Image: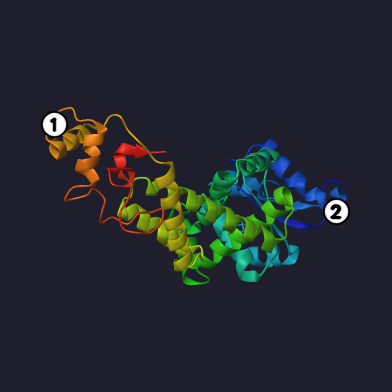
Amino acid sequence: ADRREQTHFVSWTWCYTLEDVRSALNTLTRSTALDTIFLSMCFFVKNHFRCLIEPTAATGSDDLYDEEFEHNLTRIGCMVVVLDTWNQPTYIKRIWTIYEHFTACKLAIPVRMVMPETALESLRLKVQLGAEGWYEISQALAEMKCQEAMAFNSEDEAKKRLIGETVGFGRVDRHLNHAMSMMMMESVFQYSISDFQGVVADQKLKHTLKLLEEELWDEQDDAISRYVDLLLDLEMSRETVESEIRKIRAEQSEAAGVSLRSVEFDELASSRTGQTNPTFNEMKEAFWLGQYPIGKDIICPRDGMPGCAMVDWIPRADRRE
């Protein structure tokens, strides 16, 4: 028996391959017996003689996206969203699939998201990268912006306006994000939803701190300010952010080395000592024991006191770990 009353409405796109669709839908059998799953898929349930060969014929076969769609979805009571990948999936770029998801959101129909095994394996490999991989996963979740879905004609534009004027794209984004988080949690990580969201947030925080550390080597104010704002958005307190910055600067001060390429240092040595090739003992006198000691008024990142090592005074381009 290959047909029975529909149990799952499938929201998908025809650009997917047969292998990917079969692989994704097979994940349903992990929690539901195969012989109890009967899918409502437009490829099979539409009368394509009417909508493709005789598109002007007056029939009720093309009603999946009009008022009857809500009735059918309510009758079925479950939507399965098929993605081709976890990062920038094709699904979120098509207004018709977004419209289907919007309808499920509006009617409070349960949504389950599935992906092919190849996509799930790609996700697992990202997790193995540690903080960097987790950051990519969190960004993929954050970048699910259905308002950017493409509309190809006036009918598409009408659907897009309808979403914006009713529940709004923000609510659909959150609905999609939750469904994707649930899929990741169940299929890859085996966490509870709260644990999964906590892990994602924690890994994103760690990755942002790592990026801030890289920026602090250059000390570009605008870049540092951007990462401070990101950390505040991740619910790190300003006091903690400032403490982390002090800690990173102290560690970098201890680990920093100077470049041999610095022509400016040769010029500094000559101007301070009045000699073309001074000894380092002569430079010591001129640099720190004279009238204008180098670094005297700069706060040392290691102890927070005035007076810093020369490695903290020289141009940032001339020092690295």
Front position among marks 1 and 2 = 1
Say left or right for 297 vs 242: left
Horizontal side of 150 relative to 12 (left or right) equals left
Type of residue at label 2?
A: Thr
Residue 299's x, y, as percent?
A: 32, 57
Nearest to the observer: residue 49 or residue 113: 113
Name the spot of residue 320 as percent of width and height, x first. 38, 38
Amino acid of disc 1: Gln
Q: Is 82 in front, or is 3? A: 82
Q: Quadrant of residue 222?
A: bottom left
Rendered-image quadrant of the C terminus: top left
At which x and y percent is residue 138? 56, 53
**Numbered label attached to residue 5:** none
Point out the tag, 1 or 2, that comes first from the N-terminus. Answer: 2
Q: Element type at marker 1?
A: loop
Q: Which residue is mark 1?
A: 275
Q: Which mark is residue 36?
A: 2
Q: Residue at 81% x, 57% y: name it.
A: 5
